[in-house]
Each structure stands twice: as C-alpha cells, then as structure tokens.
C-alpha cells in the first residue's frame, strides 16, 4: 500500500509544481499586458498632444514635434519588446509581416505564409533587457491615473 501512496504523492507533487509554474507565468503575462496597455495609452496621449500643438500653432518648432514623435517611437519599441517577452512565455511568436500570433514551433506564418524568424535570429535586433529597468517600481509606476479608466 505504501508504494501506491508514495507514487500518488509523487504525481501530486509534479502536478502542483506545474500549477505554480503556470500561475507565475500568468502573473507575468498580466504584468506585461498591463505595461503594454499603459504604453498604448501614453502613445494615444502623445498623439493628442501633437495634434493640439499643431492646432494651436501650425508653425510649431519642428524640434518640439520631433521630440514627441521620438517619444512615440520609443514607446512603440518598448511595446514590441514586451510583446516578444509575452509571446515567449505563451509559447508563440508574432509574424513580422502581418502581426499574427503563431505557435513558436512553426517556421512559417499560417495567415500570410511569411517565414518566421528563429529565436536566435530575433536576438540580433532585440535590445538587451534594459527596458526592464525602466519598470522596476512596477506597481507604483502605474499611478492611479492610468488604472482608473478600468
Ligand atoms: Zn503573417
């Protein structure tokens, strides 16, 4: 009898470990989603800012406009980086051509047929993990104004 219980215990332990691993991934996924949402909201705000500036003064200093556009670019890069992380957690990758989510084991996109980069290839234009430093304070970083809307 002892043997049966031991083996059940063994199975149970393995299963529990799997669950906590999943829970960890789920919270990472949520965290990344929240950060992506935050950046997307900021981008909308910056676009609105560009519009307002132009509305008030169409002759606005191009340097001011460029700074805002650069801000959008930076945030978009950050979003791309986070999407990549998100996909590696969920075991899929994004088609570089049509943005479809594809299983990471596939070599070609099921939607448009484009060849998908291998994980090694992705690294060459992936930025080092510096983007993470930006979010070290994670929860306090997302101040009330960005969370309020939901
Ligand atoms: Zn595609």
Image: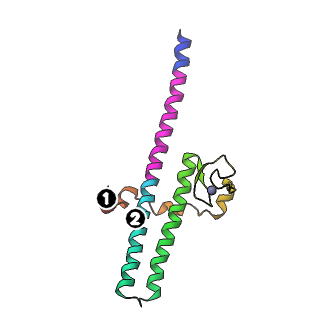
> In the picture provided, is 54 more to the left or to the right than 8?
left
Which of the four quarters of the rendered structure image does ligand 1 lie in?
A: bottom right
Q: Quadrant of residue 51?
A: bottom left
In the picture as drawn, the residue positioned furthest to the bottom comes out as: 59
Quadrant containing the C terminus is bottom left
In this rendering, the answer to whether 146 lies above or below 21 is below
Task: Give the labeled residue for mark 2.
Answer: 41
**Element class at badge 1:** loop
* Local crowd size for mark 1, using a 10 Å CA cut-off: few (<14), some (14–19), many (≥20): few
Tag of residue 149? 1
Q: Quadrant of residue 35?
A: bottom left
Question: Is 114 a magenta residue?
Answer: no
In the picture as drawn, the residue positioned furthest to the front comes out as: 112
Question: Is 19 a magenta residue?
Answer: yes
> In the picture provided, is 55 more to the left or to the right than 69?
left
Tag of residue 136? none
In this rendering, the answer to whether 58 lies above or below 138 is below
Q: Position of residue 11 (x, y in %)?
A: 54, 23
Mark 1 or 2 closer to N-term? 2
| Ligand 1 contact, mark 1 (Cβ < 8 Å) | no
Q: Which residue is painted at 63% across and 61% down in the image?
A: 97
Q: Position of residue 16 (x, y in %)?
A: 49, 30
Q: Position of residue 64 (x, y in %)?
A: 43, 84
State how the image is colored.
rainbow
Q: Quadrant of residue 36?
A: bottom left
Write down the region rendered in magenta.
9-31
């Amino acid at each position: 009898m002892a043997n049966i219980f031991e083996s059940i215990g063994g199975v149970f332990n393995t299963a529990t470990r799997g669950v906590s691993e999943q829970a960890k991934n789920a919270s990472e996924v949520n965290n990344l989603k929240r950060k992506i949402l935050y950046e997307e909201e900021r981008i909308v705000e910056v676009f609105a800012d560009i519009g307002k500036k132009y509305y008030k003064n169409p002759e606005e200093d191009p340097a001011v406009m460029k700074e805002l556009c650069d801000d959008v670019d930076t945030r978009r890069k950050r979003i791309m980086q986070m999407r990549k992380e998100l996909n590696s957690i969920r075991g899929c990758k994004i088609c570089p051509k049509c943005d479809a989510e594809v299983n990471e084991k596939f070599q070609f996109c099921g939607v448009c047929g484009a060849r998908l980069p291998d994980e090694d290839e992705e690294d060459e234009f992936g930025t080092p993990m510096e983007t993470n430093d930006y979010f070290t304070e994670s929860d306090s970083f997302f101040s009330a104004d960005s969370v309020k809307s939901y």
